[in-house]
Image: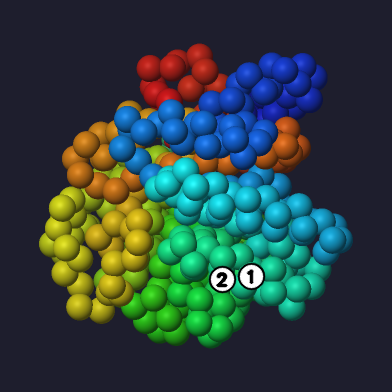
Amino acid sequence: MRFVGRTIVLFLPLMPKFFVRWISKRYVAGESLSDAIKVMESMKADNTCFTVDVLGEEINSISEASYFISEYNNLLDSIVENNLDANISIKPTALGLLIDENKAQENLSNLLKKADLSNIFVRLDMEDTRVTQPTIDLIYEMHKRGYKNVGTVLQARLFRTPEDITNICTKLGPNADFRICKGIYLEPNDVAFTDYQDIVDATNFSIDSMLKKGAYVAIASHDTPVINHSLDSIAKIQMGAGKKDPRENSGSKRNGKGNGYEFQFLLGVRGDERRKLSSDGHLTRVYLPYGSRWYEYSMRRLRENPEIAMHVAKAFFLPWTNRR
Ligand code: FAD
């Protein structure tokens, strides 16, 4: 499977850009903010909410952060103006985390302040292991400054994740708010699981640990064994569709959030499963990326993790296996 993915990735740069754009249309809302708004409006019947990401990541000079700051400011305004059920996702390296930590803190706290005025939550995406601890430290710093509308992502494939869950829950108590995913960056085997079943087991373990510790848990996986495990775990502790979060150690329900948990899906991936969860009464959220840097971003992601190319090819040639 990985070989097929690698072969596809090898030939991708030879394909005309319009063709790549046509394929990626399913996964990227468009180049501009108005494209993103249109896609969210068009999905109203899906009964889902959104987390919107401005495409791009690690910047090379701190001045480049201004593009992201201005785009996220406009995005926050548009969410309010259009009365959308959406929050935002940010890559900390796009705010300068690897260049100037103080500046990145200032950039983020300005965005959090604005988002908080409209009761909008901000998720810090998790990138590769160079920034795992700096991203967690950024969360601690923002909570210390009084911003409770921010939480990060943990990647279950990393060996360190169970300890991170414990530390974050201890420090933030009922304000701990996670997105948990397998992790898209293929990390080496001295820091991460590399086998599929080990990664699934680690993901399920992390979900259970977060639920037990009272955290808000956004389950970001399209994988049936993970979704089914989550549904079982939620039911076992009397959580679930239409039920109030019964955990004594959990935080109060925040605006636009589910009762202690939600399911998250990437735009264009396993829409059937998402719509089924939603019609069963679970809160679902779509991760919706947009931006002018879609080509570079998509190419880099595919090179880093050729399995994605395999998923995309399968969805293209066998559409009945993966509905939009
Ligand atoms: P897989 O076994 O990879 O996929 C299960 C099935 O889903 C596949 O068989 C296929 O049918 C379908 N599928 C999965 N991905 C795709 C795709 N791209 N195109 C088409 N079909 C696909 N990772 C991070 O490292 N940091 C983050 O901040 C982060 N945020 C995320 C936010 C959301 C909402 C989601 C859903 C994922 C996020 N990820 C993030 C990516 C995540 O870590 C995984 O790499 C990705 O979700 C694939 O793992 P999976 O659990 O869906 O299982």
Q: Is mark 2 on a helix, strand or loop?
A: helix
Q: Mark 2 points at which residue?
A: 113
- Binning the other alpha carbons within 10 Å of mark 2 as few (below 14), some (14 to 19) or many (20 upward) gives some
Image coords of residue 135 (percent x, y): 61, 69
The way the protein has been coloured in the rendering is rainbow
Residue placed most toward the observer, 315 or 110 = 110
**Quarter of the figure that contains the C terminus:** top left
Circles 2 and 1, Cβ within 8 Å, touching? The answer is yes
Image coords of residue 251 (percent x, y): 30, 74
Give the residue drawn at x 66%, y 44%.
55
Q: Relative to 247, say whether 272 is above or below.
A: above
Disc 1 marks a residue whose amino acid type is Asn
- Which image quadrant is residue 27 in? top right
What number is the disc on residue 1?
none
In the image: residue 260, left or right of residue 223:
left
Give the residue drawn at x 58%, y 41%.
289
**Quarter of the figure that contains the N terminus:** top right
Image coords of residue 78 (percent x, y): 54, 47
Task: Give the Cα separation between the discs numbered 2 and 1.
Answer: 5 Å
In the image: residue 156, left or right of residue 258:
right
Q: How many numbered badges does the structure rendering display?
A: 2
Q: Does the residue labelled 1 lie within 8 Å of ligand 1?
A: no
In the image: residue 141, left or right of residue 45:
right
From this viewpoint, which residue is outermost toward the top? 317
Disc 2 marks a residue whose amino acid type is Lys
In the image: residue 242, left or right of residue 155:
left
- Binning the other alpha carbons within 10 Å of mark 1 as few (below 14), some (14 to 19) or many (20 upward) gives few
Q: Relative to 96, say whether 15 is above or below.
A: above
Give the residue drawn at x 56%, y 61%.
124
Q: Mark 1 points at which residue?
A: 110
Q: What element carries label 1?
A: helix
Give the residue drawn at x 25%, y 79%.
249
